[in-house]
Amino acid sequence: MDNVRRQFIKGGTALVAATSLYLLHDAGAEDTPQGKVRYALLHDETKCIGCNACAEACRHTNQVPEGVARLRIERSGPYGEFPEQYYRFSRVSCQQCEQAPCVNVCPTGAAYIDDKTGIVSVNSWKCVGCQYCIAACPYHIRFINPLTHSADKCDFCKETNLRDGKQPACVEACPTGALMFGDLEDPHSNIVAALNTQPVYRTKEDLGTHPKLFRIRAKAGGITL
């Protein structure tokens, strides 16, 4: 396999561009076959305390080795003036793009969007380690797993908790309820209700990637992305 990887990497380079229009609550709905789901995650920054319980649960559940991470929480700030200063805790993980550059550039099909769940996933046995997906990801969250030697990232615990009928490990571990997971195709789901009633934002929307990681801003204004 190492020889195959080395021979493939010598093959050349790849470029990707993906742009299209996107509506917050209806994106992809017309193209989603009946009976399939479209999972998304909401991070409520007003509830996040930066405890990293989510990141530790992710590492344990998905057996992510030390030195790399599928999920991390970044702290920025302080913002404002004392005594009204505050910090912002931001989730850094796969954005689960509906127009995923990583999938577009993968030459072997190792990076793919799962037909049944809409989750951007990785078939490690197909990955040749070319790192095209890592270069193409505008969110800089993919990495090479030092144990599998393949590209890796958050997949909403598709092969672990989700497969067993549970919520993603990060959602289950959050002590403040800052994370909400659900199906955008289910009009009765909690996440759809939240998206329809609260102001949310997503990072780098202008790239046309259509991320399915939504966020509730910690404070109104004051932060420029």
Image (cartoon, helix red, strand yellow):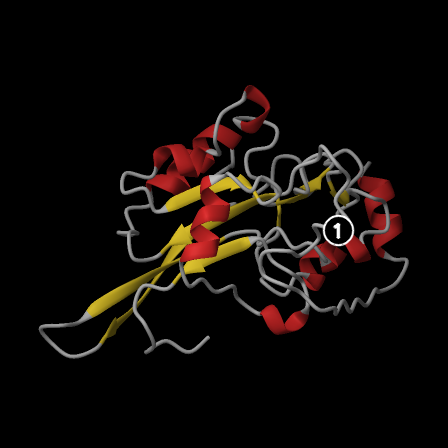
Which sits in the foreground, 132 or 92? 92
Label 1 is placed on what type of residue? Glu
Please provide percent x and percent y for residue 11. Answer: 90, 58
Residue 197 in view: yes
**Which quadrant is home to the N terminus?**
top right
Name the foreground residue: 158 vs 149.
Answer: 158
- Going by the image, does 50 lie left or right of 21? left
Q: Quadrant of residue 173?
A: top left
The image shows residue 30, relative to residue 19, as above or below, that is: above
Query: Residue 124 at x, y = what percent?
Result: 72, 36
Residue 54 in the image: above or below residue 107: above
Q: Give the image quarter of residue 138.
A: bottom right
Pointer 1 residue:
30
Answer above or below: position of 202 versus 113.
below
49 or 210, nearer to the observer: 210
Residue 118, horizontal then vertical, whole percent: 68, 42
Q: Nearer the viewer, residue 124 or 16?
A: 16
